[in-house]
Image (cartoon, rainbow, N blue to C red):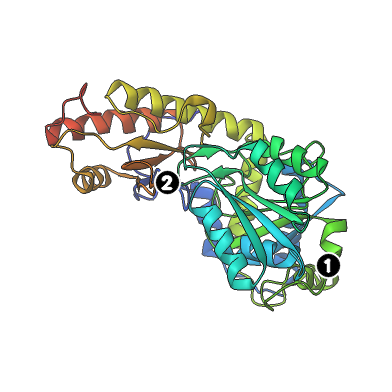
């Protein structure tokens, strides 16, 4: 959905956030937060219900899935999902190729849930043959955890193939779709999983403060008594909201109202197809433009999700990342440092209220900054 050219700053004068979330939001999402609502007021309860009812549409899960919201960041939702769905006597296979897979393992360790890890490099998808071997040899494994898009590198993991394998071997799949939800297709009619976790401040383009889990109804019913904490108990949270329309504890009201507005804008843009197309165009402009300046991406095109792109750090001695970062911020752009162990790198996001003209202007600004730093445009990498 193209927009008119604009300067390198948001409509409020803030820098554009080329990050994986929090991200640049629309003016209309910002504006709805200037009002106050009571958490037990009928108007707010109706807004919250519209949010919860609308989210399963994104995975084509109407009727089969329910939304269980969880106050806090996306990690709160992932922890709620893992500690509610993996029972005390269960065991999880955690697929790791970045920081968020490792975080899931830490959550399970802290919760006292048995787990085993299948780890690949940050630029490498999980090995299906090895997963099959692990599951075949270890009958104690009840659940498999996978990250749809691992923002450590920006890799798109093959959750569809993983789901088919997990289902064939009679196990249950839990998905962290934090940075993919709303941009990469995930069709519950074709992909078998018990639950998927995401948050308000990623591809739906809301603000931080609300995580949520879309749970298969039948699977959620089995989680009663599993939770290791009071506040992160998905079963109990769902029961309370189903009966009263209200959260057990104070909800992030302004975040939810902003998320409601963001959801309306998401569906108006064409849902997953429309938003995913815009992000893909953003990523194409970014990768092509940075390539012309000499930057190399970490991932090949087949593995790259249009969410966040990791670039190798230039080898030119004149390139100093902090100076590069500060110069871009001074010009109205905020990027992300690297988080890899396999390569010295930095990351640039393609999501949020960003459009083709923003990405083109950003690439032009990078060229200016490189010239200012004395980094050769064609020998930057």
Q: Is 176 situated above or below 236?
A: above
Tell me: 346 left or right of 283. Answer: left
- Work out whether residue 233 or residue 158 is closer to the camera in this orientation and state it: 158
Callout 1–callout 2 Cβ contact below 8 Å: no
> Residue at horizontal 13%, vertical 34%?
372
Alpha carbons under labels 1 and 2: distance apart: 35 Å
Q: Is 90 situated above or below 269?
A: below
- Work out whether residue 171 or residue 32 is closer to the camera in this orientation and state it: 171
Position of residue 219 measured from the top left corner of the image (x, y, whole percent): 84, 58
Q: Nearer the viewer, mark 1 or mark 2?
A: 2
Asked whether residue 170 is in view, the answer is yes
| SS label for mark 1 | helix
| SS label for mark 2 | loop
Looking at this view, name the residue that lies furthest to the front: 137
Q: Which mark is residue 106?
A: none
Q: Residue 242 carries which label?
A: 1
> Residue at horizontal 79%, vertical 67%?
238
- Work out whether residue 165 or residue 364 is closer to the camera in this orientation and state it: 165
Q: Which mark is residue 19?
A: 2
């Amino acid at each position: 959905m193209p927009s008119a050219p604009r300067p390198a700053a948001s409509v409020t004068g803030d820098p554009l956030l080329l990050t994986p979330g929090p991200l640049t939001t629309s003016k209309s999402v910002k504006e709805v937060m200037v009002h106050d609502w009571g958490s037990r007021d009928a108007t707010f309860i109706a807004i919250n219900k519209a949010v919860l009812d609308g989210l399963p549409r994104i995975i084509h899960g109407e009727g089969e899935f329910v939304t269980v919201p969880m106050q806090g960041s996306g990690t709160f939702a992932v922890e709620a999902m893992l500690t509610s769905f993996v029972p005390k006597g269960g065991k999880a296979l955690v697929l790791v190729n970045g920081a968020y897979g490792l975080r899931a393992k830490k959550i399970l360790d802290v919760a006292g849930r048995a787990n085993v890890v299948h780890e690949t490099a940050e630029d490498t998808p999980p090995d299906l043959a090895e997963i099959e071997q692990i599951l075949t040899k270890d009958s104690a494994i009840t659940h498999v955890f996978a990250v749809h898009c691992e923002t450590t590198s920006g890799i798109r993991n093959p959750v569809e193939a993983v789901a088919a394998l997990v289902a064939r071997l009679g196990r249950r799949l839990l998905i962290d779709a934090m940075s993919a939800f709303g941009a990469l297709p995930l069709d519950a009619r074709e992909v078998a999983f018990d639950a998927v976790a995401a948050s308000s401040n990623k591809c739906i383009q809301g603000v931080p403060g609300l995580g949520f889990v879309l749970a298969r109804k039948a699977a959620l019913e089995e989680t009663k008594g599993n939770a290791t904490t009071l506040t992160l108990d998905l079963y109990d949270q769902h029961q309370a909201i189903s009966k009263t329309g209200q959260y057990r504890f104070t909800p992030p009201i302004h975040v939810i109202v902003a998320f409601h507005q963001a959801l309306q804008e998401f569906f108006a843009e064409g849902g997953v197809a429309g938003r995913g197309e815009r992000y893909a165009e953003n990523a194409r402009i970014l990768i092509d433009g940075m390539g012309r300046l000499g930057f190399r991406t970490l991932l090949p095109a087949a593995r790259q999700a249009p969410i966040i792109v990791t670039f190798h750090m230039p080898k030119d001695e004149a390139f100093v990342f902090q100076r590069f970062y500060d110069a871009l911020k001074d010009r109205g752009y905020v990027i992300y440092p690297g988080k890899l162990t396999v390569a010295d790198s930095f990351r640039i996001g393609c999501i949020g209220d960003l459009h083709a003209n923003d990405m083109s202007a950003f690439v032009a600004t990078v060229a200016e900054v490189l010239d200012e730093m004395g980094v050769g445009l064609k020998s930057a990498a």
